[in-house]
Amino acid sequence: MAYEFSNTVKIIGFGDVVKEFLRTHAENIKTYNLEIYARNIRKIRQENNCSFYPLQSYKPSPKNIVFYCCSIDEEEQIKRSHGDKLSRYTVSEQNLRIVREFRERGFFDMGLIFVLTNPSDLMAEYIAKTCPNKHVYALGSSVDKHRYQRIFDATGILNLSLKYDICGTHSDYPLVDIEYNEDIKTLLKTFDIKEPRCAEKETALLNALRDKLRSEIKMEFNGFKPPIKSGALAIANALRDLARNDAVSVSGLARDSMHFAIGYLDPELLIFKPTRPQSAVCEKLLGEIFRHHQEIFKSMVPSCEDENYEGPDCFITSE
């Protein structure tokens, strides 16, 4: 059965990422009208095909397409952690408490929900496991695939022919899943991988590429300021794919294992399929990634649910 949604997309939050999206991508989004809801919007106003509303005006509906983009001030939090970790997990506990507030007000109970707030797959997994609505997905994987393409382009190997996808979790830096061909030998030389056995070569190559992905993301930081353009691109990519009825690159709940994983969403049937690794080596590495993700999830959620916790009043919610 095909699902029918409104042609109005609702964005919850009006921080730097949403402002960047409106500045650089919104004019290309012709299929949908946009509505922005946030605490820092005081009066209803209209600009082009975009309407702005106070947060209390938002009404959940089964026909809503929602992008959740609320966050604490991530730049301030990273500064307070002395910049030791330019990581999405640096803001996870505080952002989970904000998510909980919205969950208790029923914001996620209906509709098609896309979560951009960092770390997006952990936030979305929490929502999916605590709300009646199971159509909750995390953004970010489409941008990771662009990053891997930049890594391959930067090798300088002309006519590099690779069929690849990504798998794992967005927050833990996904693995690239490569279909092996003759070009792999060239990549092994490029990364100076000399392990004797095929499995060891593959492991070393996947880890080297994942390290490159980490470096790509660190280079996108502006001092302590997280990547803004990447977040805006993630929203634009999802809206483009929805408008075309193309598979949307997201993270979703893998029903067989009950954890979040990168895959693709059929926007008409709302069927999510996680990306399955093609090799035993990739599958083994993937298992380690998923175990780490679940450890983080289990450690974050109890603190988020702690009724005695006094919230991070020193932070400004970045909407």
Image: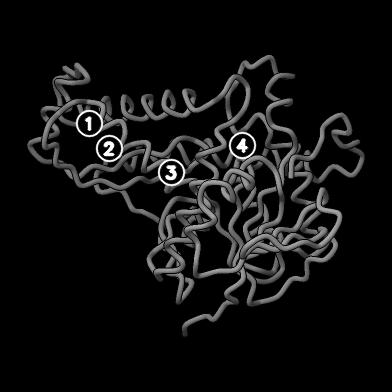
Circle nearer the N terminus (4, 3): 3
Q: Position of residue 267 (x, y in %)?
A: 46, 70
Q: What residue is shown with label 1?
A: 202
What residue do we see at 52% from left, 47% from top? 24
Q: Amino acid at mark 2?
A: Val
Residue 159 in the figure: left or right of residue 125: left
Circle nearer the N terminus (4, 2): 2
Q: CA distance from mark 1 to mark 4?
A: 27 Å
Q: Nearer the viewer, mark 1 or mark 3?
A: 3
Q: Nearer the viewer, mark 3 or mark 2?
A: 3
Q: Amino acid at mark 1?
A: Glu
Q: CA distance from mark 3 to mark 2?
A: 24 Å
Front residue of 37 and 23 = 23
What residue do we see at 32% from left, 29% from top? 209
Front residue of 259 and 60 = 60
Q: Amino acid at mark 3?
A: Val
Q: Position of residue 8 (x, y in %)?
A: 61, 71
What residue do we see at 64% from left, 45% from top? 19
Callout 1 touching callout 2 (CB < 8 Å): yes
Q: How is the image coloured?
A: one colour
Callout 1 touching callout 3 (CB < 8 Å): no
Q: Which mark is residue 143?
A: 3
Q: Amino acid at mark 4?
A: Ile
